[in-house]
Amino acid sequence: MRTMIRRVRNILLSLISKVSPDPYLVAELWRKQGVKIGTGTCVYRDVVLSDTNGLIQIGNNCVLTGCAVIAHDASTNKMLGLKYGEPSPSQIVTIEDDCFIGYHAIILMGVKIGKGSIVGAGSVVTRDVPSDSVVSGNPAKVICTVAELVEKRIQLIKSHPEIFPAGIEKLTAL
């Protein structure tokens, strides 16, 4: 009976998380379902966390946008002789503090995203990402450091201030 109540509770929490526009509330709803998520982390409502028994660990001050984090691999279940409902092979997925995961990115089982890294939109991450790195592509590869990307954006904003709605004055803080 307890298992059934827990299952219904998690389904209701999941449904609420799909309609909430507040990414901090969505993160809290995932926490209530047992996902380990640090403080100050935003999880947007279209994020998929395929967590198997607490195997997804997300640090503090991260942003997850429309991505999928998958801690299992059911693709070989039939070949492994597993029946529907039996546990698939699973590994921990770790997203360390201060990371940004772009829209439609996919993080696969066993991957660790290093502190302060950025995963570009649409990337498929199959291997660990070093700290302070920017990765992109399928499969994702390191394309630069976060510092290099920030410098590129500063140069772009200086040459085209119209693309920066916050105003070029904001750059003086950097």
Image: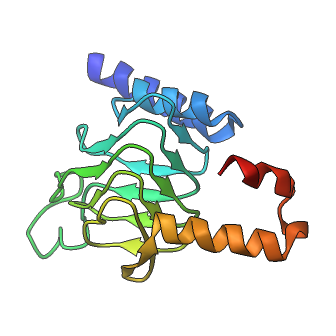
User: Quadrant location of residue 53?
Assistant: top left
From the viewer's perspective, is residue 111 above or below residue 19?
Answer: below
Q: Seen from this angle, which residue lies furthest left? A: 81
Q: Quadrant of the N terminus?
A: top left
Question: Does residue 73 appear left or right of residue 32 in this picture?
Answer: left
Q: Seen from this angle, which residue lies furthest top? A: 2
User: Quadrant location of residue 19?
Assistant: top right
Question: Does residue 166 appear left or right of residue 141 in this picture?
Answer: right
Image x and y of residue 108, in percent:
31, 64
* Residue 1 in view of the camera: no
From the viewer's perspective, is residue 139 above or below residue 135?
Answer: below
Question: Does residue 115 appear left or right of residue 86 in this picture?
Answer: right
Question: Does residue 8 appear left or right of residue 24 in this picture?
Answer: left
Tell me what residue is drawn at x 37 percent, y 19 percent.
5
User: Quadrant location of residue 31?
Assistant: top left
Image x and y of residue 109, in percent:
25, 61
**Figure disc tally:** 0
Image x and y of residue 52, in percent:
26, 45
Applied colour scheme: rainbow
Of residues 97 and 75, the one drawn nearer to the viewer in this rendering: 97
Of residues 2 and 25, the one drawn nearer to the viewer in this rendering: 25
* Residue 7 in view of the camera: yes
Of residues 18 and 158, the one drawn nearer to the viewer in this rendering: 158
Tell me what residue is drawn at x 74 percent, y 75 percent.
156
Tell me what residue is drawn at x 17 percent, y 52 percent.
86
Image x and y of residue 64, in percent:
52, 50
Q: Seen from this angle, which residue lies furthest front? A: 172
